[in-house]
Amino acid sequence: MSETKTRRAEATISLWEIFWVFFRIGLFTFGGGFAMLPVLSHELYTKRKWIDKEELTDIVSVSTVFPGAIAVNSAFLQGLRMRGVPGMIAAVTGIVTPSIIVILLIGMFLFRFASLHTVQAFFKGAGAAITGQIAYAVYVFGRGTRLNLRTIGLTVVILVVLFVFKVHPIVAILISGTVGMLIFPKGES
Amino acid sequence: MGMLFHLFTSFFLIGISAYGGGIATIALIQYEIVSVHGWLTATQMRDVITIAQMTPGPIAINSATLTGYRICGIGGALLASLAVLTPGILLLIAYILTVSRLRSKESLNRVKMSLHPGIIALIIYSVYTFGSISIDGFATGGIAAAAFFAILFIGRRVHPVLIIIAAGLLGIAIFH
């Protein structure tokens, strides 16, 4: 991930600029997740050449292996790569600040008016639609997974554990991580 | 002080399963916030997750900010947001200090592949847990189904947030 090619230009990039670019990325990525990939690519690669295509792919692919938002993890890695720990702090602060400000403003407003009948009617409709959106996420994730007997089997086992035993949902990640490492042999990916 | 500690540990746990922005964390957020601690009612939880999904930024952080604010004000909002980011950042630091030197792409892919079934299971489970607090009859069930197909067929041309807003306006027309 550390190429010398882009390093020279990076020495002159200020922490403020790093903060500002990631602030913009944070501001324009509604919903998070993979929605921000085109924005990330536009800001870091197309517009500024802070990174080359291969590095971008590397950063995004490492980001998806770790918990946390892909956007935040990418900001962490890219900030660190550009300016070390201060760069990392600038990038992470930059990418989370817009949503925290927007969310706080909306939160203050919402919690004041939440009990209004019209607002509740809005949330009843919008909330139902969110369920549809989560169902769509099942479809998207399912399509992105290589389906075979082992992945389907493990998914079903975890679902049974969740629905039947009503355990803490974190168990799903624990089972998947440990059993997965056992049943997916090395060299197959 | 005890409250802030619990807020931190709850969102730290939520952060552990927040893969890929965190739609998979919805079931976990509901479990921690409503079932374990009773910090929000089911309806408040529905509102929080709906807003979190409609605003910029990852849903896990957004719901952390909102829930933290609701429980402990601005301090709670910042603490919960920090807590949800912590597991990922700690693991990334560990990765950079150790594994990245080996440049082992293969083992990263293996971890990713191993976690995938758990994440899909959590998203399916979230359809159930969030459905149970947002669907209470034919009208809301119909809106959920319509939203699914709308995002499936026109989601590339029309931003999903606009579809959610349309559903909210429909809600005002039907339920008000």
Image: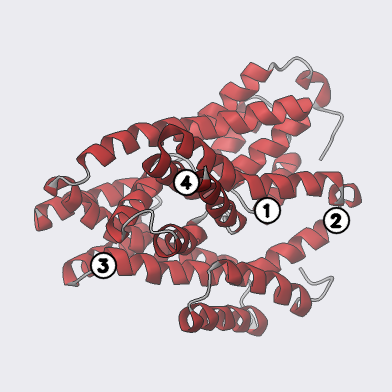
Q: Is residue A147 left or right of residue A32?
A: right
From the viewer's perspective, is B31 left or right of B70? right
Mark 4 nearby-residue class (10 Å; few <14, some 14–19, many ≥20): many
* Identity of the residue drawn at 67% across and 29% down: A89
Q: Give the CA distance from mark 3 to mark 4.
A: 23 Å
Q: For marks 3 and 2, give the CA distance.
A: 45 Å
Kind of residue at disc 1: Phe
- Tag 1 residue: A66
Neighbours of disc 2 within 10 Å: few (<14), some (14-19), many (20+): few
Please tell me whether mark 3 or mark 2 is closer to you in this view: 3
From the top left corner, tell me how far across and down residue B68 is, in percent. Answer: 44, 43
Q: Specify the quadrant of the image occupied by residue B147.
A: bottom left
User: Counting residues from the N terminus, which is met first, the one under dot 3 or under dot 2?
Assistant: 2
User: Residue A95: horizontal and vertical position, in percent?
Assistant: 56, 33
In the picture, measured across the screen, residue B40 lies left or right of residue B14, that is left
Marks 1/4: CA–CA distance:
18 Å
